[in-house]
Image (cartoon, rainbow, N blue to C red):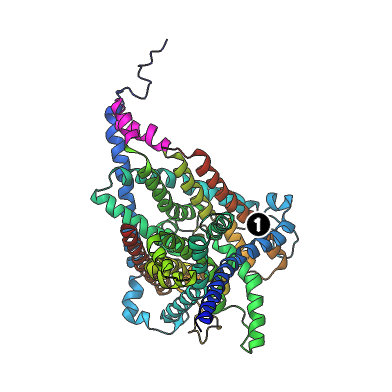
Amino acid sequence: MESPFSNKSPGAVTRSSRWAEPAFQKIIFLSALAIVVLLLGVFVSLFVHSMPSLRAFGPAFLFGKTWDPVRNTFGALPFLVGTLLTSFLALLISLPFSVGISLFVGEYFKQGPFSAFLKNTTDLLAGIPSIIYGFWALFVLVPIIRNFEMKAGIFPYGVGIFTASVILSVMIVPYTAAIGREVIALVPSDIKEAAYSLGATRQEVITKVILPYARSGIGAGIFLALGRALGETMAVTMVIGNSSRMPQSLFSPGNTMASVIANEFTEATKVLHLSSLIEVGLLLFLVTLAINMVGRYIIKRISIEA
Amino acid sequence: MHQKKLRWRIIKDRAFRGIVVLLAFLSMLPLFLILFYILKNGLLALSWELFTEIPKPVGEKGGGISNALIGTFMLVCTAGVPAIFLGIAAGTYLSEHKARKLAYWSRLGVDVLQGTPSIVIGILAYLWVVVPMGGFSALSGSIALGVMMLPMIIKSTEETLNLIPYSLKEASLALGVPYYRTILRVILPAGLSGIMTGILISVARIAGETAPLLFTAFGNAFMNWELSKPVNALPLLIYNYATSPYAEWHRVAWGASCVLVGFVLMMNLFARVVTRKWKMQF
């Protein structure tokens, strides 16, 4: 019969632990190191491969209005403008809705089936792949907007910057709302009670106490949503119209940094074209990096305070 | 005068509450509209043929998505296995050596990678794999997806392990169990539910990713089992078919969307069940 203290029991120091112990430490060390190496690799690769374009255009790349692969002239301004317009418009559209959800879940109905329902639905919204949003927008949203444009007397493209902003706003609501509801629920109840005891109505407590208190947290949520909106590719690519000219109005077709990469990368045969696209990717990477870092910094500061 | 002002404030309060409720439910509307359209058009397109046939050329009726299903399965598996191992190992390091310099940099790397747009990761997989190999391949697609999976798995592993009480580890070490076995046999199993949740959510996420596959896995109209050749994937097929002008392809795309959304929602639901059922109480 096997003794309970045989080598097979997990408690026994076996011969294998002599080499397994350092090997285990080495494996987890190398895995952590791999992440750092990966990150450095991202930087270096993007930088090295955008060198031809960096050399050819320098900082003028950022201000050039023409993106013409045929004449080998590349300026990224139309995409920068397109990205900024779609992202900020999307934030603007989504803000009332995400604040609404945050207040609903974080203040009005903290428990109960309604808030559970809302929480679950926002989680599901966040989980749906962006290609599905794009597909849906292309077949449902675009005709609606084309109809609207015909009535308003604008050239009825249907696709364009505005359409992309609308679908983006749907996609980022869950991100802002998730952080918003946490920070609103974190507002200390004594200051709320103080306001109530002075005779404030609930609306006054919300607009004068809760929202100012939770301001920086909601700001962090907006930053993280912005980081996501800037890099969103598929849904935008499908409905923005893919025009490399400077957008003339909110309803004209355009391109974002991400969508121009998605559209032209496989067709880029010239070195300069490819490297210009990679430089756009580098820019996109750096911008989202900066915005995410700011958002995370704010969140970290809040959770220390709370 | 006073009475009037009071009534005005009460009305304002009621109105505000109404607006909040309205906005909250309005923002749920898109989800239901999307699910409605996917179900309405998708269920009609679902058939046995859809799952068993490969796509047919333009003009021919029918055709299926079997090559995309196999492709997505291949991509997720070859991306997932290394990413899960590497992710759990790195997450263990971050939780075990919290204060080290490497942990700080590594954590920063995870944060940055998590925020990196997926299209940029596609560019990297192109530069790192497609260019040296001389062509689009399933392997480059899985590397792109694996890089996307890593931060999610590391994060969930680290956060789960941080919640496990130190006394559990001390108890195991006090019994003379070597450190590595304590981690592998006591700590990691105790955090299984959290780690599994992370894995399931990340699989759901990468199964629907399109952008990094555009110039890595590239898409393929035929069945392909080889890692070194281009392969079709469910989201790629939806993209190509949805943007095509053919009604028959749109129909297939709706069917494929239905399958994809079903898979993603199932994974999310499954993750929830795992969290609830397997959760260890300390």
Asked if the magenta segment contains residue B182, the reply would be: yes
Q: Is residue B105 left or right of residue B20?
A: left
* Residue B26 image-quadrant placement: bottom right
Type of amino acid at the residue the image marks with label 1: Cys
Q: Is residue A102 left or right of residue B179?
A: right
Dominant SS type (magenta): helix
Q: Is residue A279 above or below residue B162?
A: below
Q: How far from the left and from the top, in percent, is residue A246?
A: 48, 84
Front residue (pair B123, A85)? A85
Can the viewer see residue B227? no
Taking the spot 34% from the left edge, 52% from the top edge, the residue there is A35
Q: Which residue is mark 1?
A: B258
Q: Is residue A39 above or below residue B273?
A: below
Q: Is residue B193 left or right of residue B90?
A: right
Q: How far from the left and from the top, in percent, is residue A129?
A: 55, 60
Front residue (pair B165, A260)? B165
Label 1 environment density (alpha carbons within 10 Å; few <14, some 14–19, many ≥20): many
Front residue (pair A107, B153)? A107
Asked if the magenta segment contains residue B174, the reply would be: yes
* Residue B166 image-quadrant placement: top left
| Number of dots carrying numbers | 1
Quadrant for the C terminus of chain B in the image: top left
Q: Is residue A227 above or below residue B227?
A: below
* Residue B238 image-quadrant placement: bottom right
> Helix, strand, or loop for circle 1?
helix
- Which chain is home to disc 1? B
What residue span does the magenta drawing correspond to? B167-190
